[in-house]
Amino acid sequence: MSELLIRNGLLFDHDICTSADILIRDGKIAAIGPSLTTSGRVLDAQGKVVMPGFINAHTHSNQALEKGLCDRYPLDAWMVIASYGGANAELTPRDLYVSAQIGAIEMIRTGSTSVLDMPRVDLRTFEAGSNAIMQAYIDIGFRASVAVSYTDQSFPASLPLELIPNLSDSLQPKRTAAVADVIGHLESFIARWKGKHALVTPMVGPSSLPRCSTELFEASVDLCRRCGVGMQTHLLSGKSQVFVGKQRYGGSTVDFIRRMGGLEEWATFAHSIWLDDAEVSMLAQSNAVAVHNPVSNMKLGAGLAPMVELRRQGGRIALGSDGASSADSQNMFETVKGAAILHRINHTPDQWIMAEDALDMVWNGGAAATRQKVGKIAVGYEADLVVLHSRNMFLAPKDQLAGQIVHSELGGSVDSTIVAGEILMLEGKIATIDEAAIHAEAQEIVGRIYAGLPERMKKFEDVRPMFDELERRVHAAPLHFARFCS
Ligand SMILES: [Zn+2]
């Protein structure tokens, strides 16, 4: 039996704001109250805030070494450069391990205690690559649900190619894997990891419906049902996918997924931007979780997700940073603030997402997305907690504290981070791994990735005019969603 006592902090979550001790036993919150005692370790939180760690419900750990990679590229062009064999040079299992730990370090330093990671892993080294990522999280002590991302088609298969004149041969869609092979890899990943370690949970991650064959997506839904695992996928993350949905899925991508049986509580849909009004209602009425990525959506100019409408209709919403080559940061303070303030530009104040709503999304929505008992300071919950020192903030009543955490803080106050009752960072120092050594190794990998970049960018320049034209045509096409017309 292991114990940790957090003494006399100002406990803050969605429901409470009070000074008390927290006794943690075997990774879970065992008691909350004044003057608790322990024979184990004591962490003095006098004058500090203790809150549940943020849950980052969508990122791609394989991109953690690609910060600063792309600036003037919209989503589809960025996908080709960053995600499909562009700067995403072939990553070895060790590279994936280092990349996952670099992302985890940033999250630990900025108030997150768990992640729903959707890393892209080469099918040729799938077993070693996926194992390396799981081990990276175990070694650093971070809680992770890992939905390894996959497709069975080349990226152009997901584009409305009829909008591109003079399509080059290199953009002709290709089949890249057999469905049975992909599903076989996933079955073995689930068998290796399901229920094997308290910190890591396997999930499945079909990249998106248009980026997969319908057959593969259906098989993925079936796999979730058979194996009792969750799924994360991207949903209508770019406007071009509306045109694909109209042509390929009978008009509604969301309804197509619903009819397939995929709109369930175990399914999480990253981005969820270009939903029409009926699709917003359909998602809201389901138990599936949308993951809002406001910073990434702004950075890539991908669109304004209908989160106010979805929330008003009772939809479940979590928050995510997205990968570091699109959003360039894994700092969830940025994302929480982005979610709270982005939608104010086109909604009246009575509809705004307030600080406490954004915290509800990152904690309760994140818990729903990862299906873990996290995001709350209550007995029986996982002891995934963050201690904030008050040098940059003021201890204040609940509403003002929520406002400071959401609107004023960027992670500079994160003092200590605890996951499953283990201290991962104490007073700013990472306690579980040699941070300097991992950083040095990451720098070597980054050097390798960027050494080959000019050559890969040259290949992209050949097809760039076609992407520019596609972007122009998609951008110009009107969409008659009611929320754009009010
Ligand atoms: Zn993503």
Image (tube, rainbow, N blue to C red):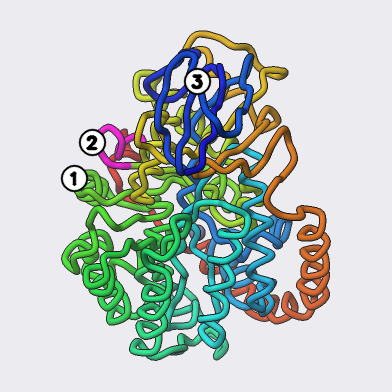
Measure the alpha-carbon separation of dots 3 and 1.
39 Å
**Residue at image coords 63%, 39%:** 110
Tell me the tag on residue 285.
Answer: 1
| Type of amino acid under label 1 | Gln
Label 2, on which residue?
313
Mark 2: which amino acid? Answer: Gln
What residue does disc 3 label? 21
Question: Which callout, 2 or 3, points to the residue nearer the camera?
Answer: 3
Which SS class for mark 3? strand
Q: Look at the numbered discs 3 and 1 and tell me whether their residues touch, using CB distance below 8 Å.
A: no
Q: Quadrant of the C terminus?
A: top left
Q: Residue at x 51, y 81 (%)?
A: 127
Q: CA distance from mark 2 to mark 1?
A: 8 Å
**Looking at the image, is 366 positioned above or below residue 271?**
above
In this view, 137 is above or below 193? above
Q: Is residue 185 above or below residue 385?
A: below
- Label 2 vs label 3: CA separation? 38 Å
Return the disc, 2 or 3, that comes first in the chain's sequence.
3
Q: Are marks 2 and 1 in contact (CB under 8 Å)?
A: yes
Q: Badge 2: few (under 14), some or many (20 or more) residues near its Cα, within 10 Å?
A: some
- Residue 20 rendering spot, x and y as whole percentages: 48, 16
Residue 88: numbered disc: none
Task: Say whether mark 1 is within 8 Å of ligand 1.
Answer: no
Specify start and end residues of the magenta stretch as a single range: 308-316
Residue 71 lies, in percent from the top left, at 69, 55
Is 360 left, or right, of 467 in this rendering? left
